[in-house]
Amino acid sequence: MTAIHFRILRGVTKIVTVSGITLCAIGLMSSAIAASPQSLTLGFVVRDWFTEVYNSKFIDECPEGLATSNDEIWWRGLSKVDRARLTDNGLIQNLNRMPTAMRRGPEGENVCLNPTVVKDPPMRVVEGKYSFGANLDENVDGQPTANTCAHNNFTHPDGTTGIDNQMYRLIGCVYGWRRGGLPELNAHEGRGTSGLGMILIEVTRVTDPRNSPDVTVTFYRSVDQFALDGAGRPLPFSSYNIDTANGKQRYGDSLKGSIKDGVLTTARGDVRLPFYGNYNFLHPAIRDMGLKLEIAADGSTAKGTVSGYYDLDEFLYYVGGMVGHTSTGDNCPAMYVAGYQLADGYPDPATGQCTHLSSSFSIGAYAAFVIHPEQNAANTGTDARVDAGLKKP
Amino acid sequence: MNAKTKRIAVLSALAALSALLSSCGDVEPKSTGSPPAMRRLTNDQYRNIIADVFGPQIVVAGQADPLLRTDGLLAVGARSARITPSGFEKFYGLARSISQLVVNEDNRDHLIPCQPASAKGADDACAQQFIAKVGRLLYRRPLLPGELDTAMKSAGLAAQTTGNFYRGLSVALSGMMTTPQFLFVVDETEPDPDQRGHIRLTAYAKASRLSFLLWNTTPHEALLTAAEKGLLHTTEGLSAQVDAMMASPRFEAGVRAFLDDFLRFDQFETLEKDSVIYPAFTVKVVEDAREQVLRTAVDHLVDRQRDYRDLFTTRQTFISGALARIYRVPTTKPSGNAWVPYEFAPDDPRVGLLTQVGFAALASHPGRSSPTLRGRAIREALLCQKVPDPPGNVDFSLFEAADSNNKTARERLTAHRTAPACAGCHKLTDPIGLGLENLDGVGQLRATENGAMIDASGDLDGITFNDAAGLGKAMRENPATTSCLVDRLTAYALGRSATAGQIVFLDYLKATFVKNGYRLPDLMRRIATSEALYAVSAPEVDVKPVQSAAAAVATGAALQEVSP
């Protein structure tokens, strides 16, 4: 093993080469590092964030077909004369007639912003057996617990039973949400070019990048855009400053975890994350969130899953605010009703109505240096020549 | 006188003698000057001049033909540069676009010192004010009567023809910017009043030589005024100007220009890497890699006045966001053009300029490192030693063959050196370049190549080392390292490699460079204030006095080839 040490600013940075594998680690000015000078820090920036959806070849999971869209319901309700008038004899396509189609409330209300003003046919949801995800409630029968409501479990394609993923059950038959659908790809594209909603993962207390029994995983938001290569992929080992407000870092929830054979697995806990997609900013608190991250041998990339209970209201707000993308198959009123029927996590103490959906997301990440505000404050871009009085600022 | 007093007296005498001998070493020896010559402006000089004369808002959109590197320097190649018809078209295009920008409505009010009586025709008085003022800066001396007359006629004729005073000025300006007087830095001479039968550079020619050495641009107003007053012919006057110029922030531009030429950084303009192999090596990295070396060198040599040799062992540098990714280090300024000071840790393998991306990437192949190219670059650029070109019939299959037994460059080169025709030269380069093998083709650290551990040991002129840090130390201790810098800087200043008559001057410079702790600014000052820099000998060809150039302009003669 060859250890190569760097010094930058007032922090300590190390690059550790293990059997030809180079991993980046940043030691910060935290007391944890001071108390344990041997520990390393790994950093990642999340580029890919996709809701996990199990798509079978013949859409067996949706035996009655895909969910009826808002546009279709609106269209069905129109007379021939109105269809011709409102769609220029059919020439106005879904996306462009969407603003009109959404205002189908009895008083012309936008049904995505007011999903209870109409009563639509029940939404078709997933009836299949399989799903990606995790067993969040630690049972296999879907019976209610102190923090969950009754629900049907899935089986993972790898055979694991007791999978909880009511988010998938809700959206799995909406064609826009299925694999390759526009809302997810548009959100992915937006995050890649805007620098918004970027999640940083920092793993501290690492003793060995491939095997560490006790690590701390902390989640932040970045304010720096992705540094991309010529093909539009993020470049590993870029630096990202943590978002701050009044000099203090925002977000920053932590989970305990471990690394075994290059796979980082955390315990479950509540984590608030930044999210941006389809012109919406969210900061969902994912309850009982767990992260499983497989770190590539060269340390430059990682891929894995985030699972936990996703706030239903936050999700419905997201869908309702998607604007143009409701033309991709969503129907807010039916999804609102179905969502509350399927919610399986964290019942409201007063009503017993569950408020969260079990869910799972696949993520892809790139090795990154996570720059803390104190590091930035320690170096505000001054020049050594200025510091030494050799040059005017 | 008692014994103690005698001892003190003897010691005092020895000290005085020592001081005397020491001061003798500071006296510049007489050296023979070079024949007068003309040097074509480099692209950077052209841009600097336009920015200085007209302001940064006048954009130079394009560049001239590249110069041919000669004796290790483009500055020497500039002396034998020729302007081909297509090259002239480029200069003409530049001159035309610049002159149009200068007189356009956005710029004319602050760049033209007067208002014409009418914008719809000629105004000789106003035109003369502008042409005389600008011409002095472009030609680096006052215009001769014939030159002024020619430009005035052009301006007047064009203004009358087009009915536009400003278009007239534009035509005159573009004409001036395509003359030899502008495009070439001319060693104009005059009879030397102190040495009958000899010639000397005119004060204005001295000003040019000084200005291009220290600032890499045309002489500024104060320097031209000093020339006009004859101050540059006096030791005190020359020293005062040199001191003022070296104290200016613009001195950095002069140092950068020399280092850029010395380190052959013009190669960055055509540097490309395989983006599949090195995705992080973006266009921004290329730009920043060049800047990092120059920034580090200027900080070390100029701002901190440190020993030139320590450039090969320093751990202090600056990084940008783009470079931080290559170095795999954090930065608080990951995007944009921000730079932050950075110091590699004492046990870090990156030590000195040779381990910076700028050097490692430049002396490599597009898809892999090259101990041979790196060794050759060190020999030729930094030690001023010639490595012969490879013969045309080299069998690269020995080297390139996919052979699992030859995983590292060392193994492949060992196989390659079995060819007797190759062995001779590779002995000169490979033992040096192998010391940098822990840096891949773009300068990223690596411990292995194709799964095999890299052995970065080597030797430089008998000094063995185990890694890049050791190579840096070997470079630092090699006498050729500092000798080469003096040779190149002198050639850069003179515009030609030293002649036999200038060897004593070189020896003097090398001795004082050592004595003064290898400080580059001190060396530059010695050169700038030396007699040797301005000494000229009788021309090797029949170079007419300055009137001949004026006559050439007056008759509309085309640019002439100039050869020393």
Image: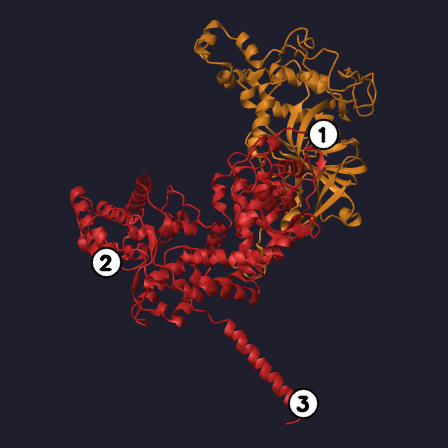
Chain colours: A orange, B red
The type of residue carrying mark 3 is Lys
Q: Are marks 2 and 3 in contact (CB under 8 Å)?
A: no
Above or below, comparing residue A139 to residue A266 in the picture:
above
Q: Which residue is mark 1?
A: A286
Q: Which mark is residue B547?
A: 2
Q: Are marks 2 and 3 on the same chain?
A: yes
Residue B195 lies left or right of residue A271; in this view the side is: left
Q: Residues within 10 Å of mark 3 (few under 14, many from 20)?
A: few
Above or below, comparing residue B561 to residue A295 in the picture:
below
The type of residue carrying mark 2 is Gln
The type of residue carrying mark 1 is Ile
Front one among A173 and B140: B140
Residue B527 lies left or right of residue B1; in this view the side is: left
Q: Position of residue B311 (x, y in %)?
A: 59, 55
* Marks 3 and 1, how far apart at CA: 91 Å
Q: Which residue is mark 3?
A: B4
Q: Are marks 1 and 2 on the same chain?
A: no
* Marks 2 and 3, how far apart at CA: 70 Å
Front one among A30 and A206: A206
* Precedes in sequence: disc 2 or disc 3: 3
Nearer mark to the viewer, of 1 and 2: 2
Farthest residue to the front: give it. Answer: B420
* Dot 3: chain letter: B
Q: Is residue A110 visible?
A: no
Q: Position of residue B247 (x, y in %)?
A: 47, 63
Nearer mark to the viewer, of 3 and 1: 3
Residue B134 lies left or right of residue A178; in this view the side is: left
Q: Are marks 3 and 1 in contact (CB under 8 Å)?
A: no
* Dot 2: chain letter: B
